[in-house]
Image (cartoon, helix red, strand yellow):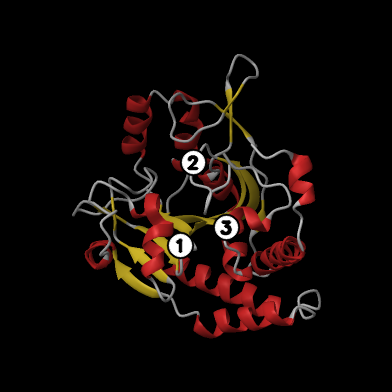
Amino acid sequence: MVTDNKYYEQITDKKKIAAIVRSEVERLTNKFFFERNFIYVEPPILHEAIENKKAEIYVSLNNNSYSLSSSNALFMGVYASEFNKVFTISKCFRNENDTLNHLLEFSMLEVEMLNCTLDDMLEIIKAYIFFILNGLIESNFIKPYNGLINRIMTLQKEFAPRVIHYDDFVASVTDSYYDESKDISDIDYLVSRQLKDVIIIIDYPTKFATWTSKRKKNGKSIAINILLPESYGELCEGCERTNNVKFLQNKIYFAKADAIQWYVEAVKKIETNRCGFGLGLDRLLRWIVGADRISDIRFFPRIK
Protein backbone atom coordinates (compact mmCIF):
# COMPACT_ATOMS: atom_id res chain seq x y z
CA MET A 1 0.00 0.00 0.00
CA VAL A 2 1.29 3.44 -0.94
CA THR A 3 0.98 5.91 1.93
CA ASP A 4 -0.62 9.32 1.56
CA ASN A 5 2.77 10.87 2.32
CA LYS A 6 4.14 9.08 -0.73
CA TYR A 7 1.13 10.07 -2.85
CA TYR A 8 1.69 13.70 -1.87
CA GLU A 9 5.29 13.47 -3.08
CA GLN A 10 4.03 12.05 -6.39
CA ILE A 11 1.69 14.93 -7.27
CA THR A 12 2.72 15.92 -10.79
CA ASP A 13 1.72 18.68 -13.20
CA LYS A 14 -0.36 16.09 -15.06
CA LYS A 15 -2.30 15.31 -11.89
CA LYS A 16 -2.87 19.02 -11.30
CA ILE A 17 -4.27 19.36 -14.83
CA ALA A 18 -6.50 16.34 -14.23
CA ALA A 19 -7.85 18.02 -11.09
CA ILE A 20 -8.73 21.12 -13.13
CA VAL A 21 -10.43 18.95 -15.76
CA ARG A 22 -12.40 17.16 -13.03
CA SER A 23 -13.62 20.49 -11.67
CA GLU A 24 -14.79 21.57 -15.12
CA VAL A 25 -16.39 18.20 -15.91
CA GLU A 26 -18.43 18.34 -12.71
CA ARG A 27 -19.47 21.94 -13.41
CA LEU A 28 -20.49 21.07 -16.97
CA THR A 29 -22.30 17.93 -15.81
CA ASN A 30 -24.51 19.96 -13.50
CA LYS A 31 -25.12 22.50 -16.25
CA PHE A 32 -26.09 19.82 -18.77
CA PHE A 33 -28.66 18.13 -16.55
CA PHE A 34 -30.08 21.28 -14.94
CA GLU A 35 -30.71 22.72 -18.41
CA ARG A 36 -32.76 19.58 -19.14
CA ASN A 37 -34.89 19.90 -15.98
CA PHE A 38 -33.29 17.08 -14.01
CA ILE A 39 -33.35 17.13 -10.21
CA TYR A 40 -30.05 16.66 -8.37
CA VAL A 41 -30.34 14.09 -5.56
CA GLU A 42 -27.93 12.74 -2.94
CA PRO A 43 -28.18 9.01 -2.21
CA PRO A 44 -26.55 7.68 0.98
CA ILE A 45 -22.97 6.45 0.99
CA LEU A 46 -23.76 3.88 3.67
CA HIS A 47 -26.12 1.15 2.45
CA GLU A 48 -27.82 -1.54 4.46
CA ALA A 49 -25.55 -4.54 4.01
CA ILE A 50 -26.57 -7.50 1.85
CA GLU A 51 -24.46 -10.59 2.47
CA ASN A 52 -22.13 -11.92 -0.24
CA LYS A 53 -22.80 -9.07 -2.67
CA LYS A 54 -20.16 -8.91 -5.41
CA ALA A 55 -17.27 -6.51 -4.71
CA GLU A 56 -19.05 -5.05 -1.66
CA ILE A 57 -16.97 -3.31 1.01
CA TYR A 58 -18.51 -3.88 4.43
CA VAL A 59 -18.18 -1.43 7.28
CA SER A 60 -17.36 -2.50 10.83
CA LEU A 61 -20.13 -0.35 12.26
CA ASN A 62 -23.41 -1.08 14.01
CA ASN A 63 -22.85 -4.85 14.01
CA ASN A 64 -21.68 -4.84 10.37
CA SER A 65 -25.11 -3.75 9.17
CA TYR A 66 -23.73 -1.31 6.60
CA SER A 67 -21.66 -1.45 3.43
CA LEU A 68 -20.21 1.35 1.37
CA SER A 69 -22.16 2.25 -1.75
CA SER A 70 -21.07 0.26 -4.82
CA SER A 71 -23.93 1.67 -6.91
CA ASN A 72 -26.91 3.90 -6.26
CA ALA A 73 -29.14 2.47 -9.00
CA LEU A 74 -31.86 1.35 -6.59
CA PHE A 75 -31.93 4.63 -4.69
CA MET A 76 -32.01 6.50 -8.00
CA GLY A 77 -35.06 4.47 -8.98
CA VAL A 78 -36.82 5.62 -5.82
CA TYR A 79 -35.94 9.25 -6.47
CA ALA A 80 -37.14 8.95 -10.08
CA SER A 81 -40.46 7.53 -8.91
CA GLU A 82 -40.96 10.83 -7.08
CA PHE A 83 -39.26 13.38 -9.36
CA ASN A 84 -39.31 11.81 -12.84
CA LYS A 85 -35.74 12.75 -13.95
CA VAL A 86 -32.83 12.70 -11.50
CA PHE A 87 -29.04 12.65 -11.49
CA THR A 88 -26.21 12.53 -8.99
CA ILE A 89 -22.42 12.53 -8.84
CA SER A 90 -21.61 10.24 -5.97
CA LYS A 91 -18.77 8.38 -4.29
CA CYS A 92 -18.82 4.63 -4.86
CA PHE A 93 -16.62 1.86 -3.48
CA ARG A 94 -15.81 -1.59 -4.88
CA ASN A 95 -13.35 -4.23 -3.76
CA GLU A 96 -11.79 -4.84 -7.19
CA ASN A 97 -8.27 -5.92 -8.02
CA ASP A 98 -7.23 -4.47 -11.37
CA THR A 99 -5.61 -1.07 -10.97
CA LEU A 100 -5.28 -0.09 -14.65
CA ASN A 101 -8.91 0.98 -14.83
CA HIS A 102 -10.27 0.40 -11.31
CA LEU A 103 -10.19 2.28 -8.03
CA LEU A 104 -11.50 1.18 -4.65
CA GLU A 105 -13.04 4.65 -4.30
CA PHE A 106 -14.35 6.40 -7.39
CA SER A 107 -16.90 8.94 -8.60
CA MET A 108 -19.89 7.98 -10.72
CA LEU A 109 -22.51 9.93 -12.58
CA GLU A 110 -25.82 8.11 -12.12
CA VAL A 111 -28.96 9.06 -14.00
CA GLU A 112 -32.51 7.71 -13.80
CA MET A 113 -35.43 8.76 -16.03
CA LEU A 114 -39.11 7.93 -16.35
CA ASN A 115 -40.92 8.13 -19.71
CA CYS A 116 -37.68 7.05 -21.35
CA THR A 117 -36.76 4.31 -23.83
CA LEU A 118 -33.33 2.82 -24.44
CA ASP A 119 -32.96 4.91 -27.61
CA ASP A 120 -33.84 8.06 -25.65
CA MET A 121 -31.21 7.20 -23.06
CA LEU A 122 -28.54 6.61 -25.69
CA GLU A 123 -29.20 10.01 -27.22
CA ILE A 124 -28.82 11.66 -23.80
CA ILE A 125 -25.54 9.86 -23.12
CA LYS A 126 -24.08 10.83 -26.50
CA ALA A 127 -25.27 14.42 -26.11
CA TYR A 128 -23.75 14.56 -22.62
CA ILE A 129 -20.31 13.38 -23.73
CA PHE A 130 -20.27 15.79 -26.69
CA PHE A 131 -21.40 18.60 -24.36
CA ILE A 132 -18.53 17.86 -21.94
CA LEU A 133 -15.91 17.79 -24.69
CA ASN A 134 -17.19 20.99 -26.27
CA GLY A 135 -17.42 22.72 -22.88
CA LEU A 136 -13.83 21.80 -22.03
CA ILE A 137 -12.58 23.23 -25.33
CA GLU A 138 -14.32 26.52 -24.53
CA SER A 139 -13.23 26.60 -20.86
CA ASN A 140 -10.87 29.38 -19.82
CA PHE A 141 -9.40 26.98 -17.24
CA ILE A 142 -8.39 24.50 -19.96
CA LYS A 143 -7.28 26.87 -22.75
CA PRO A 144 -3.74 27.42 -21.32
CA TYR A 145 -2.96 23.72 -21.89
CA ASN A 146 -2.44 23.50 -25.66
CA GLY A 147 -1.62 19.80 -25.74
CA LEU A 148 -4.77 18.93 -23.80
CA ILE A 149 -6.93 21.22 -25.94
CA ASN A 150 -5.62 19.50 -29.08
CA ARG A 151 -6.40 16.08 -27.62
CA ILE A 152 -9.93 17.08 -26.63
CA MET A 153 -10.56 18.60 -30.06
CA THR A 154 -9.48 15.32 -31.64
CA LEU A 155 -11.74 13.31 -29.31
CA GLN A 156 -14.65 15.59 -30.14
CA LYS A 157 -14.03 15.42 -33.89
CA GLU A 158 -13.81 11.62 -33.84
CA PHE A 159 -16.68 11.06 -31.40
CA ALA A 160 -19.15 9.02 -33.46
CA PRO A 161 -20.13 5.98 -31.35
CA ARG A 162 -20.77 2.80 -33.31
CA VAL A 163 -23.65 0.59 -32.17
CA ILE A 164 -23.03 -3.18 -32.23
CA HIS A 165 -24.92 -6.20 -30.89
CA TYR A 166 -23.22 -8.11 -28.07
CA ASP A 167 -22.97 -11.37 -30.04
CA ASP A 168 -21.49 -9.60 -33.06
CA PHE A 169 -18.97 -7.84 -30.87
CA VAL A 170 -17.92 -11.05 -29.12
CA ALA A 171 -17.48 -12.70 -32.52
CA SER A 172 -15.02 -9.94 -33.42
CA VAL A 173 -12.85 -10.46 -30.31
CA THR A 174 -9.75 -12.34 -31.45
CA ASP A 175 -7.53 -12.58 -28.37
CA SER A 176 -7.33 -15.80 -26.39
CA TYR A 177 -8.19 -14.21 -23.03
CA TYR A 178 -11.90 -14.16 -23.92
CA ASP A 179 -14.34 -17.05 -23.56
CA GLU A 180 -18.14 -17.12 -23.39
CA SER A 181 -18.17 -17.51 -19.61
CA LYS A 182 -16.74 -14.01 -19.22
CA ASP A 183 -18.65 -10.76 -19.31
CA ILE A 184 -17.05 -8.18 -21.59
CA SER A 185 -17.19 -5.82 -18.59
CA ASP A 186 -14.74 -8.04 -16.69
CA ILE A 187 -12.04 -7.68 -19.35
CA ASP A 188 -13.06 -4.33 -20.80
CA TYR A 189 -9.60 -2.75 -20.75
CA LEU A 190 -8.13 -5.74 -22.61
CA VAL A 191 -10.88 -5.89 -25.22
CA SER A 192 -10.81 -2.15 -25.80
CA ARG A 193 -7.20 -2.37 -27.00
CA GLN A 194 -8.63 -3.70 -30.25
CA LEU A 195 -10.91 -0.69 -30.71
CA LYS A 196 -10.26 2.40 -32.79
CA ASP A 197 -13.47 4.22 -31.88
CA VAL A 198 -16.15 4.40 -29.20
CA ILE A 199 -18.69 1.57 -29.38
CA ILE A 200 -22.09 1.01 -27.82
CA ILE A 201 -22.85 -2.67 -27.18
CA ILE A 202 -26.58 -3.49 -27.16
CA ASP A 203 -28.66 -6.63 -26.52
CA TYR A 204 -26.62 -7.67 -23.50
CA PRO A 205 -27.02 -11.31 -22.37
CA THR A 206 -29.38 -11.45 -19.41
CA LYS A 207 -26.86 -13.55 -17.45
CA PHE A 208 -24.45 -10.59 -17.52
CA ALA A 209 -26.91 -7.69 -17.38
CA THR A 210 -27.97 -6.02 -14.15
CA TRP A 211 -30.95 -7.71 -12.53
CA THR A 212 -32.92 -4.46 -12.72
CA SER A 213 -32.92 -4.60 -16.54
CA LYS A 214 -35.96 -5.45 -18.63
CA ARG A 215 -35.65 -8.84 -20.29
CA LYS A 216 -36.28 -9.76 -23.91
CA LYS A 217 -37.39 -13.23 -25.03
CA ASN A 218 -34.12 -14.43 -26.55
CA GLY A 219 -31.94 -14.55 -23.46
CA LYS A 220 -31.06 -10.90 -23.89
CA SER A 221 -31.85 -7.80 -21.87
CA ILE A 222 -32.50 -4.22 -22.94
CA ALA A 223 -29.11 -3.14 -21.68
CA ILE A 224 -26.05 -1.39 -23.05
CA ASN A 225 -22.34 -1.04 -22.42
CA ILE A 226 -20.16 1.74 -23.80
CA LEU A 227 -16.49 0.98 -24.42
CA LEU A 228 -13.75 3.50 -25.10
CA PRO A 229 -10.84 2.57 -27.41
CA GLU A 230 -7.14 2.09 -26.69
CA SER A 231 -7.39 0.33 -23.29
CA TYR A 232 -9.56 3.04 -21.70
CA GLY A 233 -12.21 0.37 -21.31
CA GLU A 234 -15.78 0.51 -20.12
CA LEU A 235 -17.19 3.99 -19.60
CA CYS A 236 -20.88 3.43 -19.00
CA GLU A 237 -23.50 0.76 -18.34
CA GLY A 238 -27.23 1.30 -18.57
CA CYS A 239 -30.53 -0.37 -19.25
CA GLU A 240 -34.26 -0.04 -19.54
CA ARG A 241 -35.47 -1.03 -16.07
CA THR A 242 -38.02 -3.72 -15.41
CA ASN A 243 -41.28 -2.79 -13.69
CA ASN A 244 -42.17 -6.44 -13.18
CA VAL A 245 -42.88 -6.47 -9.45
CA LYS A 246 -43.29 -10.26 -9.26
CA PHE A 247 -39.88 -10.76 -10.87
CA LEU A 248 -38.27 -8.30 -8.47
CA GLN A 249 -39.92 -9.94 -5.47
CA ASN A 250 -38.55 -13.32 -6.54
CA LYS A 251 -35.07 -11.86 -6.98
CA ILE A 252 -35.17 -10.42 -3.48
CA TYR A 253 -36.47 -13.66 -2.00
CA PHE A 254 -33.80 -15.91 -3.54
CA ALA A 255 -31.02 -13.42 -2.78
CA LYS A 256 -32.27 -13.12 0.82
CA ALA A 257 -32.22 -9.37 0.33
CA ASP A 258 -35.30 -8.28 2.26
CA ALA A 259 -33.51 -5.04 3.14
CA ILE A 260 -34.30 -3.65 -0.34
CA GLN A 261 -38.04 -4.25 -0.28
CA TRP A 262 -38.40 -0.45 -0.36
CA TYR A 263 -37.21 -0.54 -3.99
CA VAL A 264 -40.10 -2.80 -5.00
CA GLU A 265 -42.58 -0.55 -3.22
CA ALA A 266 -41.29 2.40 -5.26
CA VAL A 267 -41.47 0.45 -8.53
CA LYS A 268 -45.14 -0.32 -7.85
CA LYS A 269 -45.85 3.40 -8.34
CA ILE A 270 -44.19 3.55 -11.76
CA GLU A 271 -46.44 3.02 -14.78
CA THR A 272 -44.16 4.01 -17.64
CA ASN A 273 -40.92 2.97 -19.32
CA ARG A 274 -37.85 4.02 -17.40
CA CYS A 275 -34.11 3.88 -17.94
CA GLY A 276 -30.98 4.44 -15.93
CA PHE A 277 -27.23 4.46 -16.40
CA GLY A 278 -23.99 4.84 -14.48
CA LEU A 279 -20.96 6.55 -16.02
CA GLY A 280 -17.56 6.45 -14.37
CA LEU A 281 -16.26 10.01 -14.08
CA ASP A 282 -12.72 8.85 -13.27
CA ARG A 283 -12.70 6.77 -16.46
CA LEU A 284 -14.07 9.69 -18.44
CA LEU A 285 -11.26 11.86 -17.05
CA ARG A 286 -8.62 9.26 -17.83
CA TRP A 287 -9.80 9.16 -21.46
CA ILE A 288 -9.99 12.94 -21.77
CA VAL A 289 -6.51 13.66 -20.42
CA GLY A 290 -4.94 10.51 -21.90
CA ALA A 291 -3.65 9.10 -18.60
CA ASP A 292 -1.87 5.74 -18.62
CA ARG A 293 -3.66 4.52 -15.49
CA ILE A 294 -6.79 5.61 -13.71
CA SER A 295 -4.76 6.27 -10.55
CA ASP A 296 -2.93 9.00 -12.47
CA ILE A 297 -5.92 11.34 -12.38
CA ARG A 298 -6.25 11.58 -8.57
CA PHE A 299 -3.97 13.13 -5.97
CA PHE A 300 -4.76 10.36 -3.47
CA PRO A 301 -6.03 7.33 -5.41
CA ARG A 302 -7.39 4.37 -3.49
CA ILE A 303 -6.18 1.14 -5.10
CA LYS A 304 -5.44 -2.37 -3.87
The picture quadrant where one finds residue 14 is bottom right
Quadrant assignment for the N terminus: top right
Neighbours of disc 2 within 10 Å: few (<14), some (14-19), many (20+): few
Q: CA distance from mark 2 to mark 1?
A: 35 Å
Q: Earlier in the sequence, mark 2 or mark 1?
A: 2
Disc 3 to disc 2, C-alpha distance: 14 Å
Callout 3: few (<14), some (14-19), or many (20+) C-alpha neighbours within 10 Å? Answer: some
**Spatial distance from mark 3 to mark 1, Cα to Cα?**
35 Å
* Labels 3, 1: front one: 3
Judge depth for marks 2 and 1 and give the one in front.
2
Figure quadrant of the C terminus: top right
Q: Is residue 68 visible?
A: yes
Residue 187: horizontal and vertical position, in percent? Answer: 38, 53
Give the labeled residue for mark 3: 293
The crowd level at tag 1 (other Cα within 10 Å; few <14, some 14-19, many 20+) is some
Q: Residue at x 49, y 36 (%)?
A: 263
Residue nearest the viewer, comparing 114 with 205: 205
Going by the picture, which residue comes out furthest to the left?
218
Give above or below for 158 relative to 11: below
Question: 272 above or below 267?
Answer: below
Residue at the disc numbered 1: 116
Placement of 219 over or under 125, stated as above or below: above
Q: Would residue 255 be found to the left or right of residue 293 on screen?
A: left
Residue type, mark 1 in image:
Cys
Q: Reading the chain from its start, which is encountered first: label 3 or label 2? A: 2
Q: Which residue is mark 2?
A: 97
Count of numbered labels shown in the rendering: 3
**Where residue 41 sits in the image (x, y, percent)?**
67, 49
- Which corner quadrant of the image does residue 281 belong to? bottom right
Q: Position of residue 66 (x, y in %)?
A: 59, 25
